[in-house]
Amino acid sequence: MKNYHQLFTFAAKARGNAHVPYSHFAVGAAIEDENGNFHAGCNVENVSFPCGTCAETGAIAAMTAAGGKKIRRILIVAGGDRLISPCGACRQRILEFSLPETEVLLADTEGVKKVLSVGELLPGAFKEFSHD
Ligand code: THU
């Protein structure tokens, strides 16, 4: 496994700031964009449950606000005994900003355990629409 130490540290730090009073399941995400800049996010829950946002969504918003356009790699870290698996909506969000070579890194608290391409993350994805 390649050494993703810097990105992992960034994501783990954001995870420490997760607002998770309902699930108590903290998630961190960190993106390296096309320019090599890093952006982090964590999950932010709300008493009105559907208002909550995932760590990946936060990291994508941070990247976009900072002027980043593409995800070179995104690392997602969580605890628990099963490896984190991004939700369907976040898979679609990641796809929107991906490159053919984008890497999706799934980590537990020790480090990266699995590397996926975006094609593996979301096979058969909806990518464009056309009008009649
Ligand atoms: N969550 C994320 O932030 N990212 C994922 O990839 C999966 C789930 C959050 C949403 C919610 O705040 C908590 O984890 C439990 O589902």
Image: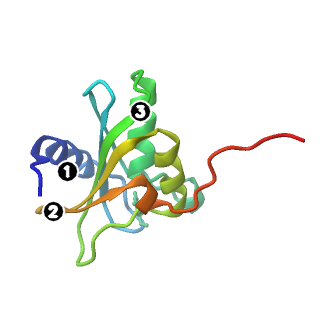
Residue pointed to by mark 2: 109
At x 44%, y 25%, the residue is 65
Q: Earlier in the sequence, mark 3 or mark 2?
A: 3
How busy is the neighbourhood of tag 1: few (under 14 within 10 Å), some, or many (20 plus)? many
How busy is the neighbourhood of tag 3: few (under 14 within 10 Å), some, or many (20 plus)? many
Task: Tell me if label 3 and label 1 are in contact, CB under 8 Å.
Answer: no
Q: Nearer the viewer, mark 3 or mark 1?
A: 3
The answer to whether 13 appears left or right of 121 in the picture is left
How far separated are the C-alphas under marks 3 and 1? 21 Å
Label 1 CB sits under 8 Å from any ligand 1 atom: no
At x 40%, y 49%, the residue is 56
Task: Tell me if label 2 and label 1 are in contact, CB under 8 Å.
Answer: yes
Instruction: Depth check: give the residue in front, 33 or 130.
Output: 130
At x 44%, y 28%, the residue is 69
Question: Measured along the vertical axis of the image, is residue 109 above or below residue 58?
Answer: below
Quarter of the image that includes the N terminus: bottom left
Helix, strand or loop at mark 1: helix
Helix, strand or loop at mark 3: loop
Q: Nearer the viewer, mark 3 or mark 2?
A: 3
The amino acid sitting under disc 3 is Lys
